[in-house]
Amino acid sequence: MDRSGAVAALQRAVAAFEVDGARWCVALSGGPDSLALTAVAAEVRPTTALIVDHGLQTGSRTVAETARQQALRLGCVAAHVLAVDVGSAGGPEAAARTARYAALDAARDGAPVLLGHTLDDQAETVLLGLGRGSGPRSIAGMRPHDPPWHRPLLGVRRAVTHAACAELGLAAWQDPHNADRRFTRTRLRLEVMPLLEDVLGGGVAEALSRTAGALREDVDALDGMARDVLDGLAGETLDTEALAELPDALRRRVIRGWLLAGGASGLTDVQIRGVDRLVTDWRGQGGVAVPSALRRQRLIAARRGGVLALHIEPV
């Protein structure tokens, strides 16, 4: 498949992408991004396609089976359809994402998983983070490497994957949700990004992606410093006096790391700042509830006798 144009661009992106292991998996939806990635990845090393059937749309089983057959024709050594039950926690988009990643993780058999996120997806993620005030970690966007997840196309525009499918004669599935304006990301894609490109004279997606890259460097540096501090404060509790001496950005990262180590999950900036106020604005207030990684319980971070401590509360 040594071709010029879009396919060649994807070949270069995947060939330059370093992922450990003799084999890998590709998360294949049947859409143009993941289908084009599958076509190129299958040439580089033994590839297993993992197709998640969320069961949320009429005909989803047929879509998944079509994608499975396409993957095998493209040279994948195996292709599996993973049927999932999507819950409701966090809204439909978040619930589907949670179910999808859990299924992929269970099926990958220790292999890394390539995801078809493009530069356009990265730009949309940054905009979502900005609009929600989610802090630098969210605005830093998706990482190229976040084992076991890997994103070789983060520097490639969506138009390239669509063009690659056309060059290869692949009939990609067009997800109706991508045109459904009830979804925030769809409105960003169809309304906000074109307006920004028009107002700012183009290049907005690339600029947002560069912003994400620059912020990731800062986030990684501060996270490394926070890990060192947390190691020095090792224990189930945190000394508030020692925390109060730290710069704000570093202290909140130490608190975040402590909460995660204690079993917290899905932390928001608002929750972390709430726990931070137990250190910086202590007036005898009660504890701060944070979500637990375990079902049917939550964690309460509270200040007692000059230390922060976590305790479990059933829900």
Image (cartoon, rainbow, N blue to C red):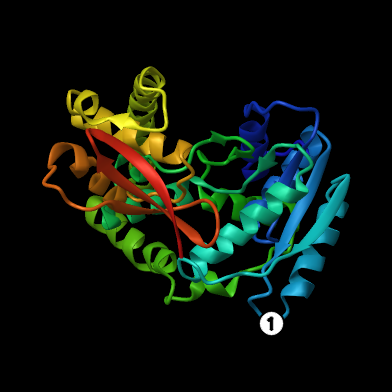
Residue at image location 31% in from the left, 55% down from the top: 197
Q: Tell me the crowding category of disc 1: few under 14, some 14 to 19, or many 20 or more residues within 10 angstroms, Cα based.
A: few
Mark 1 lies on residue: 58
Q: Is residue 9 above or below residue 38?
A: above
Instruction: Kindly tell me whether residue 134 is visible in this rendering.
Output: no
- Image coordinates of residue 171 in percent, x first then y, are 73, 64
Q: Please identify the quadrant where the N terminus is shown.
A: top right
Instruction: Kindly tell me whether residue 216 is visible in this rendering.
Output: yes
Quarter of the image holding residue 242?
top left
Q: Is residue 111 above or below residue 16?
A: below
Residue at image location 40% in from the left, 22% down from the top: 224
Which amino acid, by three-letter code, is at mark 1? Answer: Thr
In this image, 281 relative to 109: left or right? left
Quarter of the image holding residue 248?
top left
In this image, 56 relative to 191: left or right? right
Q: How many marks?
A: 1
Nearest the viewer among 193 and 84 is 84
- Image coordinates of residue 298 in percent, x first then y, are 44, 56
Residue at image location 29% in from the left, 52% down from the top: 288
- Image coordinates of residue 254 in percent, x first then y, are 33, 30
